[in-house]
Image (cartoon, coloured by chain):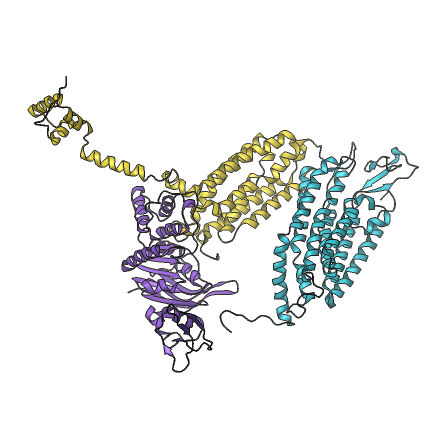
């Protein structure tokens, strides 16, 4: 149908655009149409023409594609503050997985010591997670962030919440899956929360690592006290009557957590504005 | 007109060591102020206190007329402040753009398009437009320093507090930094610390010399050089024992200290004035 | 005086002495904490403890759990020998005899600087005490109606830090006294092998009071005229085997263990006095001898004379 149209009149560029947008009517439209049927050059020009707004939009998209910030920066603001570095996210996930897999694997080999060790060491993971929230691994820019308006305890709290949000459910799942009565095996949850809030409170002023180590050691010692010494005793009897599952210990944990939270709510502004060198 | 920075009796102790001792300072709006001093003189501690990062042990400090020991006023100060720490650490796995973008988030720039435009602007100001999307671990030391400077420049703060901004930069980059900072000094205030007297001589309108936590000199760079007036001479004897001497570029020996009678005096530079002040041989004006 | 110098506490002054001791002790403590000897010894102890499962003879693991710490003590000993010999550096006379801190003061500071080793010993004892309780104790004998697992009491666990403290003091004294650090270390290793790793050979009556590593439980001979039905239910018994021809009662005697630790501490103080020398050293040595003798005498007094203890 098309024939080569050599020389002479070509459709005006504006007319072509208007025709494409549908703004041309009547005789003008017919004329352009008739011309297009015959002129390969004008057909080519029409095919490659772009309206102005769309041209600007295409340049913008090209600029964005070239200047693309990395995948990490395209996440939402809240997530970037809370997750800090990719290492922190990796740590949260891998610790949570380990929290479930390791005790279950050990229990498959030898249930009696495995459940006892689980109960003794379980609070260490949430407390370690809280210490991590204060560490350099959690923050991508370190000292650069210190004089910014948003630098505050809230960011540490967000990070710790992310870590605990991964670790505590994992621990509870592990407790429910391990052999032995769930009531006994969940006795570590409140003390873990108490330990984490103590570490959070101390960490606003001092490096909390030694307190964290001491707390975990004290908890393991408390579990050890009153552990039935009979190595071959049935699991239920071994866990029964543990000091840590008594009401007194759990109540003390709740009280400690309450005191720590109260202290935090009054001193949270001390984060990095105080004694540090 | 209220001062940008005002301190009264500012003191900071670390255990038994007194880093900043009873310092009174007033910095008014506009211009570039240089802080000179050896390592351990308290420059970093003073800058950290002014940047609302460290609390004073005693005395008062006011930035923009606000008290940084109160948390609401501290946040208000930080909204108008840009700070470069002495040894900035950047996450090696992020790109330069990511790092500056993250700091921009911390500076409360919530709108993504506006924020990323600002990030591009500051990275362009420090000359890192081409390296914007390279990971930090592939950047040289000077480039990392420039990324950190870019973070401080975000939001065009009214007060820039920079701790050794020129460290790790080559001469060309230093010149570029100078032009950025003096342009900033036209509208806002810049307070920077440095070891290098050349930086101070080049573009600081005011220089403070800090020794052992106290301000020993407060004036213009020319006045600091003038302190050494009459204490720099050409040493032709070869037997004297001056405070410092070396063979200068034209082959004569340039000595600093107490000249003998009739010696040929030379024009002092800011280095000479600083040296004599640090050695305690002249009384600061 | 310029900004670059600060007055140093002068020699012989009492007020500066404590600061000088603390400064050198801090340097030495960092060295101790990073010492390869110490950590090799700790690794050796861990290796021995991991082999506890193989000791399936009666009370085997219970005994070896404490004896295994001989490796840690040996590591501390060798490090202390090197520490004590630091002033010699191959020369006949002591280094810098006219220095602000004389040889005796330096030895005191080095003694103080060995505290990380003692701290590790204490921590190890705590971890062992907690861990073995969580694990459910060691198997000490077969029985139907009574406890067949036992955990170390606090007094027994106290032997571990006491042994490490003794090793530290002994090493420092030996290192200061002798020039041949290598030889002294080897002698120490021989002593550790003889008295520590083969501690079971030294549990006969006078020896077990004065040996370095005393192992529990002790066995009390029930004699030939013995009937199984006569023994009370609460007793734990060990039958005749290739080494013993009669029945024995197996007992853990905490008081004896406690006084044995006192004896070890007395030895440590005595050797510390020999390391430090001087007037203070003589006083320490005297105190050490008194404490050690008290420990031995007390052990003899409280030790069970008959099986019916």
Give the quadrant of the N terminus of chain A: top left
**Chain that appears purple:** B
Chain C tint as drawn: cyan
Relative image position of residue A46 (x, y in whole percent)? 17, 27
Relative image position of residue C29 (x, y in whole percent)? 63, 56
Relative image position of residue C235 (x, y in whole percent)? 82, 38
Q: Residue at x 42, y 81 (%)?
A: B260
Identify the residue at the far front of this view.
Answer: B251
Q: In which quarter of the image is residue B179?
A: bottom left
Along the viewing direction, whichever of C235 and C16 lies nearer the viewer: C16
Q: Quadrant of residue C308?
A: top right
Along the viewing direction, whichever of C60 and C232 lies nearer the viewer: C60
Q: In which quarter of the image is residue A236?
A: top right
Relative image position of residue A192 (x, y in whole percent)? 55, 42
- Above or below residue A136? Residue C134 is above
Query: Left or right of C74: which side holds B280?
Result: left
Q: Which residue is drawn at 77% across and 46% down?
A: C193
**Chain that appears yellow:** A
């Amino acid at each position: 149908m098309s024939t080569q149209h050599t020389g002479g009149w070509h459709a005006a560029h504006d007319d072509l655009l208007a025709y494409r947008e549908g703004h041309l009517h009547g005789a003008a439209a017919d004329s352009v149409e008739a011309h297009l049927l015959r002129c390969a050059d004008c057909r080519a020009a029409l095919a490659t023409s772009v309206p102005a707004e769309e041209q600007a939009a295409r340049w913008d998209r090209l600029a964005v594609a070239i200047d693309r910030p990395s995948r990490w920066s395209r996440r939402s603001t809240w997530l970037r503050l809370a997750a800090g570095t990719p290492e922190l996210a990796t740590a949260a996930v891998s610790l949570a997985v380990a929290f479930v897999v390791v005790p279950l694997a050990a229990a498959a080999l030898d249930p009696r010591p495995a459940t006892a060790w689980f109960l003794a060491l379980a609070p260490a993971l949430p407390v370690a997670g809280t210490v991590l929230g204060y560490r350099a691994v959690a923050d991508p820019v370190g000292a650069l962030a210190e004089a910014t308006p948003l630098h505050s305890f809230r960011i540490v709290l967000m990070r710790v919440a992310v870590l605990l949000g991964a670790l505590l459910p994992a621990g509870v799942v592990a407790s429910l899956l391990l052999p032995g009565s769930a009531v006994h095996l969940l006795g570590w949850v409140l003390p873990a929360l108490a330990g984490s809030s103590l570490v959070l409170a101390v960490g606003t002023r001092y490096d909390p690592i030694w307190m964290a180590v001491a707390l975990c050691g004290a908890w393991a010692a408390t579990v050890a006290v009153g552990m039935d010494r009979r190595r071959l005793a049935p699991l239920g009897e071994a866990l029964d009557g543990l000091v840590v599952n008594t009401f007194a210990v759990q109540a003390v944990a709740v009280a400690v957590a309450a005191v720590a939270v109260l202290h935090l709510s009054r001193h949270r502004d001390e984060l990095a504005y105080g004694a540090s060198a | 007109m209220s001062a940008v920075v005002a301190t009264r009796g500012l003191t900071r102790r670390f255990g038994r060591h007194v880093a900043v001792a009873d310092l009174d300072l007033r910095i008014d709006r506009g211009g570039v102020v240089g802080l000179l001093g050896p390592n351990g003189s308290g420059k970093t501690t003073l800058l950290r206190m002014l940047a609302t990062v460290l609390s004073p042990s005693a005395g008062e400090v006011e930035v923009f007329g606000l008290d940084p020991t109160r948390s609401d006023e501290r946040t208000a100060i930080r909204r108008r402040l840009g700070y470069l720490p002495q040894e900035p650490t950047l996450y090696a796995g992020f790109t330069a753009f990511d790092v500056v973008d993250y700091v921009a988030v911390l500076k409360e720039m919530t709108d993504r398009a506006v924020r990323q435009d600002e990030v591009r602007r500051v990275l362009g100001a420090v000359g890192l437009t081409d390296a914007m999307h390279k990971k930090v671990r592939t950047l040289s030391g000077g480039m990392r320093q420039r990324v950190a400077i870019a973070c401080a420049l975000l939001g065009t703060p009214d007060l820039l507090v920079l701790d050794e901004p020129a460290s790790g930069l080559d001469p060309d980059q230093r010149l570029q930094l100078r032009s950025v900072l003096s342009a900033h000094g036209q509208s806002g205030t810049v307070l920077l610390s440095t070891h290098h007297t050349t930086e101070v001589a080049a573009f600081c309108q005011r220089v403070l010399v800090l020794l052992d936590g106290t301000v020993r000199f407060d004036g213009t760079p020319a006045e600091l050089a003038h302190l050494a007036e009459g204490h720099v001479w050409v040493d032709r004897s070869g037997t004297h024992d001056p405070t410092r001497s070396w063979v200068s570029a034209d082959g004569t020996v340039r000595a600093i200290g107490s000249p003998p009678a009739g010696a040929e005096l030379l024009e002092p530079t800011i280095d000479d004035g600083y040296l004599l002040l640090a050695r305690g041989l002249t009384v600061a004006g | 005086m310029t900004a670059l110098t600060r007055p140093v506490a002068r020699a012989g002054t009492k007020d500066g002495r404590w600061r000088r001791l603390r400064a050198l002790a801090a340097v030495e403590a960092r060295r101790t904490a990073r010492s390869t000897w110490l950590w090799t010894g700790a690794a050796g102890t861990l290796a021995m403890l991991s082999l506890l499962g193989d000791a399936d003879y009666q009370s085997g693991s219970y005994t070896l759990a404490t004896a295994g710490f001989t490796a840690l003590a040996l590591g501390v000993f060798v490090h202390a020998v090197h520490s004590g010999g630091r002033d010699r550096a191959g020369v006949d006379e002591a280094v810098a005899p006219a220095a602000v801190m004389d040889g005796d003061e330096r030895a005191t500071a080095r003694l103080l600087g060995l505290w990380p080793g003692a701290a590790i010993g204490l921590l190890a004892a705590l971890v062992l005490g907690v861990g073995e309780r969580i694990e459910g104790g060691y198997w000490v004998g077969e029985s139907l109606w009574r406890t067949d697992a036992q955990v170390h009491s606090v007094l027994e666990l106290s032997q571990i830090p006491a042994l490490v403290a003794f090793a530290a003091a002994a090493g420092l004294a030996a290192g200061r006294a002798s020039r041949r650090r290598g030889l002294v270390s080897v002698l120490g290793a021989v002593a550790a092998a003889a008295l520590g790793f083969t501690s079971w050979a030294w549990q006969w009556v006078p020896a077990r009071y004065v040996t370095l590593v005393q192992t529990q439980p002790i066995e009390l001979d029930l004699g030939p005229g013995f009937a199984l039905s006569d023994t009370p239910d609460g007793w734990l018994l060990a039958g005749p085997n290739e080494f013993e021809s009669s029945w024995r009662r197996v007992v853990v005697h905490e008081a004896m263990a406690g006084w044995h630790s006192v004896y070890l501490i007395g030895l440590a103080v005595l050797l510390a006095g020999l390391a430090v020398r001087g007037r203070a050293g003589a006083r320490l040595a005297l105190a050490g001898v008194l404490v050690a003798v008290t420990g031995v005498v007390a052990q003899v007094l409280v030790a069970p004379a008959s099986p019916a203890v």
